[in-house]
Image (cartoon, grey):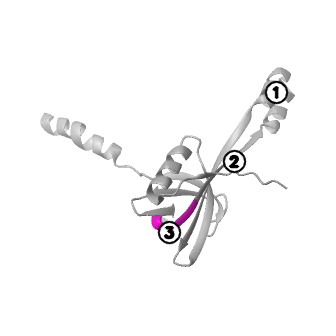
Amino acid sequence: MKNFIAFFLCVLLPVTVFAGDNGTKIVYDGGSLQGVKSGADVRLYIEGDKIRVMKGNEEVGVISASAITEISYGQDVHRRVGTAIGVGVFTLGLGAFMLLSKSKKHFIGLTWDDNGKKGGFAFQADKNDYRGLLAGLEGVSGKKAVDSSEMTVKN
């Protein structure tokens, strides 16, 4: 009995801990995926030859890696004015410090052309995941991500 418990703790338990989901949680911001509303939490799976988007257990999009035409990246930076006002009502000093802080959101966009079937979508990635997602998308597609903040339009 001791051998069985030792075997279970040493082999089977660690296997079940690491046998997890290898997708990345993202927030769908909009695009041409059917059945997904803007702001929905979905999971993005980067595989060797395709990219899958899953909402729960339902597959809502499959994009061939060779069909990807562009990967774009951008940030939305804004000050936390509402939080500063809320905190400032109770403590003036902390409210002033909160006004100095900034919040960043990281957005990644994909466009593709799969034999005339064009599409695209944008999603928001977590601050800890966006670099890995960009590297993974660049790796499977062979395309370099374009930073939208460096693209300036001059009138």
Name the residue rendered at 22%, 36% in the picture: 10
Q: Which residues are magenta?
A: 62-70
Q: Secondary structure at mark 3?
A: helix
Question: Which-is-in-front pick, marks 2 and 1?
Answer: 2
The type of residue carrying mark 3 is Ala
Q: Main secondary structure of the magenta part?
A: strand
Name the residue rendered at 57%, 53% in the picture: 145
Q: Which residue in the protein does label 3 denote? A: 67
Q: Are marks 1 and 3 in contact (CB under 8 Å)?
A: no
Q: Quadrant of the C terminus?
A: bottom right
Q: Are marks 2 and 1 in contact (CB under 8 Å)?
A: no
Across and down, in percent, residue 115 comes to 51, 78
Question: Which-is-in-front pick, marks 1 and 3?
Answer: 3
Q: Distance between the Cα atoms at labels 2 and 1? A: 33 Å
The type of residue carrying mark 1 is Gly
Q: Is residue 34 visible?
A: no
Q: Secondary structure at mark 2?
A: loop
Q: Is residue 56 above or below residue 129?
A: below
Across and down, in percent, residue 146 comes to 61, 53
The circle on residue 150 is 2
Q: Is residue 1 in the magenta section?
A: no
Circle 1 Cα neighbour tier, 10 Å, few/some/many (<14 / 14–19 / ≥20) = some
Foreground residue among 90 and 60: 60
Across and down, in percent, residue 28 comes to 62, 58
Circle 2 Cα neighbour tier, 10 Å, few/some/many (<14 / 14–19 / ≥20) = few
Name the residue rendered at 54%, 44% in the picture: 131
Tell me which numbered mark, 2 or 1, is placed earlier along the sequence.
Answer: 1
Q: Which residue in the protein does label 1 denote? A: 95
With 58 as the anchor, is 149 left or right in this view? right
Circle 3 Cα neighbour tier, 10 Å, few/some/many (<14 / 14–19 / ≥20) = some
The circle on residue 71 is none
